[in-house]
Amino acid sequence: MKKILSISLLSLIAANSFAGGYRISLQGQRQLAMGHTGVGVIGQNAESLFFNPASGTFLKNQWSFSAGATALFSNVKFQNSIYNWSNSSENMGTPFYFYGNYQATDRFSVGLAVYTPFGSSVEWQQDWPGSHLVNSIDLQAIFIQPTVSYKITDNISVGAGLIYVNGGVTFNRNLSRSMIDDYGNRSDVTIDASGVSAWGYNVGVTARLDEYVTLGVNYRSQIDMKVEGGEAKFHDMPGFLNYADGKFDATMPLPAELTIGLSYQINEKWLAAFDYNYTFWKAYDNLVIEFDNPAIGTSVNPRNYKSSGTLRGGLQFAPSEKFSARVGGYYDISPVQDGYFAPETPRNDAIAGTAGFSYKITPKLDVDFSATALHFKQTKNSYDHYKEDGSDLSFGGDYRSSAYSLGLGLSYNF
Amino acid sequence: MKKYQSIFLAAFAFSFVACEPEFENPVTNESYSRGEADFTTYVALGNSLTAGYMDGTMYRSGQQYSFPNLLAKQFAVVGGGSFTQPSFNDDVNDVGGLLFMGQPAAATRLILNMSTSGPENLTGTPTIEISDLQAKAYNNMGVPGAKSFHLLASGYGNLANMATGTANPYFVRHATSPNTTVLSDAMSLNPTFFTNWIGANDVLAYALSGGTGENQEGNTDPSTYSSNDITDPQVFEAAYKTIINTLTSNGAKGVVATIPDITSIPHFTTVPYNPLTAEALGGEAVVTQLNTSLLDPIKQILTAIGEGDRIQLYSTTSGNPLLITDETLTDVSATLTAALIANNYPAETAAVLGQVFGRARHATRSDLFVLGTSGIIGTASALPSPLDKLGVTFPLEDKYVLIPSEQQQIKTATDKFNDIIWSVSGSKKLAIADMNAIMRYLTTGIRLSDGQWYTADYFKGTENMNKVLFSLDGVHPNPRGYAFVANEIVKVINEHYKSNLPLLVPGNYPGVTIKASN
């Protein structure tokens, strides 16, 4: 019976991939508008705490606050002309953030960063042709990160943050390609894990090389999200296989990420920034799910991700005190390898264009807008590692994704 | 200031319209084409395999998976019209079977009972009444049990002929008039496209009966045939020609299918000839006892008359063969009895043993057992111990086994019928789905594009439940198997008529019906 129900909790992988191949970086409207650069950018607003914990001491004000939310629209289309299949998933999410920083002394600052780097979902039509892999997935994770920053010299600052993650995932898939209950309904299982918490850390260094160029390095640790006692609920099961709802354990590792960033203050009005992220996806070779029901057993799902990078660039134009505008973009290389392209993470390499502007409403309060468009090429790919009665099955076709976002943020500095 | 704002508002608006994903070549119905075929009115002719029969009967939920119904869904993409099937709405319990004048006339469908781990007839009352006449021609004209010449037989759908056995209960239910024919009802729909998979019962009925029927080769009067007989090739050819000539008379195109060989049907390949392990027989002591008290004395006598090969002593370490009756053997009852008496056996015992073992022999690798044998091996015979175990100490009847000479008759007939199908259909340039060849590949396995291997194996349990193609009767496909058949036919149509029809994924269709209890 184990083979029937080789539940490949692809969901849990989705969590991973959302942080990389699937990740749409939305952790601050200003920096997002510049291609989500910021590891080497100083003197902007409290968003910098996300990008580099060392940047707190370079903020201009004693108190800096930023908060915002983004409407994220992500669409995926799937088709296979051999079988006349066409399906789509259209989803919306609203990731948000809050950052606060206090410069306690000339050299020392403390801050708090709250952000939601995971928060999207995929929802195919129930019982669609890929339903044995996933029907729907919804995941969320809130990162809460207290941060300190210390200036070693006037031009070099180091910072560190402790990350507390609280997240959850809901995932539904059919039990197999053909299992039905006694009334002809497809059998499915929903996996639900909420309140999953884990700890990680974030360290960074910022060095102002001269009055134009600033260099930053940031490292975010791997965070293992351990699900213990998540709930597995079975629906429309045939009488002969009437699994009781049960529990499962699993681990969702979120990979470590190293980013090197550079900013160049061209003149008073123009600022350019570049980041290079490298994400250690290679950690994700398999996902292992253990069910407490021995009849279901342990499910091992090959992922075989590769580590990958993202190249980012952005430009800011600030013609006046009151108004500034930004454009940027990035190229994000998917960690998903050919033959491992599963429909819960149907993302290939992405090119993003970003833009935004800020407007100073009062001397202390800024409003920040951003817009992002992600372009994905049409791709033909498949997941070839679904086990059915001992055979590796393939499911695939053409995929095309797109995503765009609109964001609104407020900054308050004094 | 205003200028900048309008630029960015425009950029925002752009991001919305630019991001809806679109494929370079979106898959729509226009992606497919009918080629040289016209699927406007598709009519399916054939027997149970066309009707959607499975698990030993017709039943409501099974019928929707008939291969013509699955095929029609693919045709609909390129202009195929609606596809109707005989109504089984009266199968309110979805159990199949038949009633005749209110009395049960056929058993309910087979299910796999998890609590007993075996196939059983589903508990429930059949409600499909033969005398409820629909009098309607349907696109699916598959009639379970029909042989080639039945499609041309007037009265085959006449309720009044049920008593004489010349009518078919399923055709009776929907024949448009008492003396119409299956072919004429089919033609009344003016098909533009057809499938014709007829002929299997012309030989398979004999095989299913364990070879108890007659080979009617040379007898060209089918009205004299019994239901388990093999049809004369001339009769087959004449019927097949008439069917094909009629179907193509208005220019319709179509696909015909060949007759599968029985060696690729799990009904005949599932029960091994040697299932009797020491454990199954009751332990080593029982094996020794059987050898010394029964088999060895008989074998010694047979050896003395040069027939020692008939019986072999049971082994404690490997599977032992079933005991069968082989009507081709010389009856040595009298010799046996006389010899046993000479060996001081009581006359009465010697007579019984002589009778029982007169034409008995142990099975060999060359014998094929029908699926139903598995349920009776070791069950009680009419005789007292030690001759009380069917297949072990009492030989199985002819109907359970196809001995090599019977298999040869089946193979010869199958080959002749398939030659006729090839030549008649080839002369009309019809597409031919060589189900005989395809099923033969299934005996070793066919890997489809989804990566799964499909075989002609019977349901074995959870290790093959996701890929087994046959229903529990071991002869007819299950829904997944019919999808496999439909898929193979689509491939043939695409090739032969230069069509571009979408394929099916058999693995997405249900397999064997398993119930927790019955």
Image: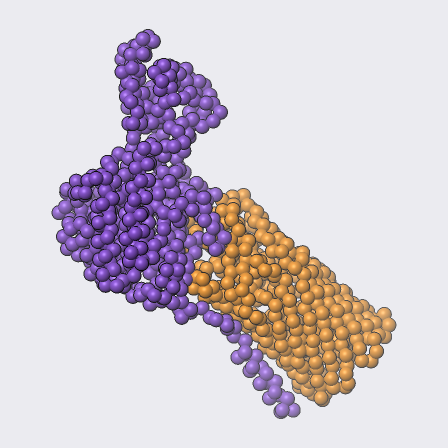
Residue B246, image x, y percentages? 22, 57
Residue A310 falls left or right of residue B278: right
Residue B266, image x, y percentages? 38, 41
Towards the viewer: A128 or B69 = B69
Chain given the colour orange:
A
Residue B102 higher or lower than A82, as above or below: above
Q: Residue at x 30, y 37 (%)?
A: B409
Residue A378, image x, y percentages? 54, 69
Q: Residue at x 36, y 47 (%)?
A: B436
Which quadrant, please, contains the N terminus of chain B? bottom right
Count of labels shown?
Answer: 0
Q: Residue at x 36, y 14 (%)?
A: B304
Chain B shade in the render:
purple
Q: Residue at x 32, y 23 (%)?
A: B360
Towards the viewer: B254 or A356 = B254
Pick out the residue farthest to the right. A153
Residue A13 falls left or right of residue B349: right
Question: Is residue A283 at least partly visible in the picture?
Answer: yes
* Residue A32 sits in quarter: bottom right
Residue A275, image x, y percentages? 72, 72
Question: Is residue B64 at least partly visible in the picture?
Answer: no
Which quadrant, please, contains the C terminus of chain B? top left
